[in-house]
């Protein structure tokens, strides 16, 4: 078994594509499900494929499918759907802003292209590699492009397959496919926490130590679950993340001022 | 098999409002260096997002807590975390999790 994150050690398109393997696995299952759901909501196969290629955002595509399915025929609430997608995807600001300082030597156009294909999953894989210091400056953009493109095309393929197979779906649950994404989130979380503990990143001195981040993770998870139960829509991830990161910052400031006095 | 105009507008509109938060920070913030406090704040973001996504995926569905059918997943997350911590292999952890879930479902049905 090739350790996916460790294979990022060479900054090339190919190594980036290999680092995307766990994402590909997750996307094949979720993308297939997305294809089935979108087709079931009344979209044609071509519309599903266009959606996955042009919008390329998992949770947003589920949301769009849900809103289209709920709409009366001939009365699609176009503006409402677009506004909802904006809210659902606003969290990408955080991801994009976190990656940006690591891509200062990359041209604006390339940064735009890399950002365009940013997802929760490609972000965490990239961030984990960056935090562990295994990505040299040279070739970092190529690595990221490889990661992005693998994820992108596996998503589109899975959407197409799901759309075509809609109506004759077997039991993917039997082989645990629906657990691929939660498992990936959990494993990445562990890798994140340990990457910070023995960080070799250039800004290691500024990194929040692992124990504090464990508290941040716990707070964020609890908040996200509570908000998801209380508030309709997909606000919970955004609110919980902002709150938990602000908590981390205030703890850091309090710790610093306590050390000074 | 066709593309309706209003669906096309939804797709393009959604893609534009998705591209903005993905692209703008990447361009602007890679040209200027960030203050230390903002770096600290952003440094906590990935862990916070992952934990929020994981908690929601495992425990919430349709704005209510998950039922007993999610117990295999709640058990299987343990080997995932342990294997990720000990081997640091993302693929290994994910595959072990899927294997555990499918075994638990097979035993229980």
Image (cartoon, coloured by chain):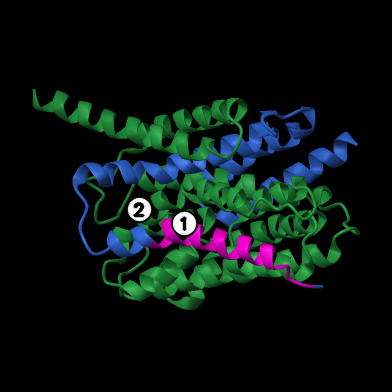
Chain colours: A green, B blue
Give the side of residue A31 with respect to residue B30, left or right: right
Q: Quadrant of the N terminus of chain A?
A: bottom right
Residue A232 in picture, x, y percent from top left: 61, 32
Q: Which residues lie in the magenta part?
A: B2-23
Q: Is residue A125 above or below residue A147?
A: above
Question: Quick check: is B9 in the magenta stretch?
Answer: yes
Prevailing secondary structure class for the magenta stretch in the rendered image: helix
Earlier in the chain: of badge 2 and badge 1, it is 2
Q: Secondary structure at mark 1?
A: helix
Residue A261 in picture, x, y percent from top left: 8, 22
Q: Residues within 10 Å of mark 1 (few under 14, many from 20)?
A: many
In the image, which disc is placed on residue B26? none
In the image, which disc is placed on residue A123? 1
User: Which quarter of the figure has residue A36?
Assistant: bottom right
**Pointer 1 indicates a residue of which chain?**
A
Q: Nearer the viewer, residue A183 or B8?
A: B8
Give the residue at x 68% y 63%: B7
User: Label 2 to label 1, Cα distance in Å?
Assistant: 9 Å
Give the side of residue A246 with respect to residue A170, left or right: left
Q: Which residue is mark 2?
A: A98
Q: Nearer the viewer, residue B13 or A261?
A: B13
Give the residue at x 72% y 56%: A34
Q: Nearer the viewer, residue B5 or A241?
A: B5
**Pointer 2 indicates a residue of which chain?**
A
Residue A246 in picture, x, y percent from top left: 33, 34
Residue B102 in picture, x, y percent from top left: 79, 45
């Amino acid at each position: 078994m090739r350790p996916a994150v460790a294979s990022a050690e060479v900054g090339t398109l190919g190594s980036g594509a290999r680092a995307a393997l766990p994402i590909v696995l997750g996307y094949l299952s979720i993308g297939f499900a997305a294809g089935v759901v979108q087709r079931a909501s009344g979209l044609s196969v071509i519309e599903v494929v266009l959606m996955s290629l042009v919008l390329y955002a998992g949770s947003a595509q589920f949301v769009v499918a849900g809103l289209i399915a709920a709409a009366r025929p001939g009365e699609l609430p176009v503006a409402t759907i677009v506004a909802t997608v904006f809210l659902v995807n606003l969290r990408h600001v955080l991801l994009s802003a976190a990656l940006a300082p690591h891509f200062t030597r990359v041209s604006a156009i390339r940064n735009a292209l890399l950002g365009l294909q940013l997802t929760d999953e490609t972000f965490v894989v990239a961030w984990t590699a960056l935090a562990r210091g295994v990505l040299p400056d040279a070739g970092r953009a190529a690595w990221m492009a490889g990661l992005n493109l693998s994820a992108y095309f596996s998503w589109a393929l899975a959407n197409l397959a799901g759309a075509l197979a809609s109506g004759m779906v077997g039991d993917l649950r039997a082989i645990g496919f629906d657990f691929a994404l939660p498992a990936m989130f959990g494993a990445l979380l562990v890798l994140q926490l340990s990457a910070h503990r023995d960080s070799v990143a250039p800004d290691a001195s500024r990194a929040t130590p692992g124990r504090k981040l464990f508290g941040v993770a716990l707070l964020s998870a609890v908040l996200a679950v509570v908000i998801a139960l209380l508030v309709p829509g997909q606000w919970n991830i955004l609110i919980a993340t902002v709150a938990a990161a602000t908590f981390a910052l205030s703890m850091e400031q309090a710790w610093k001022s306590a050390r000074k006095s | 098999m066709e593309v309706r105009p209003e669906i096309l507008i939804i797709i393009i509109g959604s893609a534009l409002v998705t591209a903005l938060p993905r692209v703008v920070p990447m361009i602007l913030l890679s040209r200027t260096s960030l203050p230390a406090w903002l770096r600290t704040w952003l440094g906590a973001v990935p862990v916070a997002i992952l934990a929020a996504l994981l908690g929601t995926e495992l425990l919430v569905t349709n704005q209510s807590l998950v039922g007993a059918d999610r117990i295999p997943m709640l058990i299987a997350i343990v080997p995932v975390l342990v294997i990720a911590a000990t081997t640091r292999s993302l693929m290994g952890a994910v595959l072990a999790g899927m294997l555990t879930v499918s075994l638990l479902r097979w035993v229980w049905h």
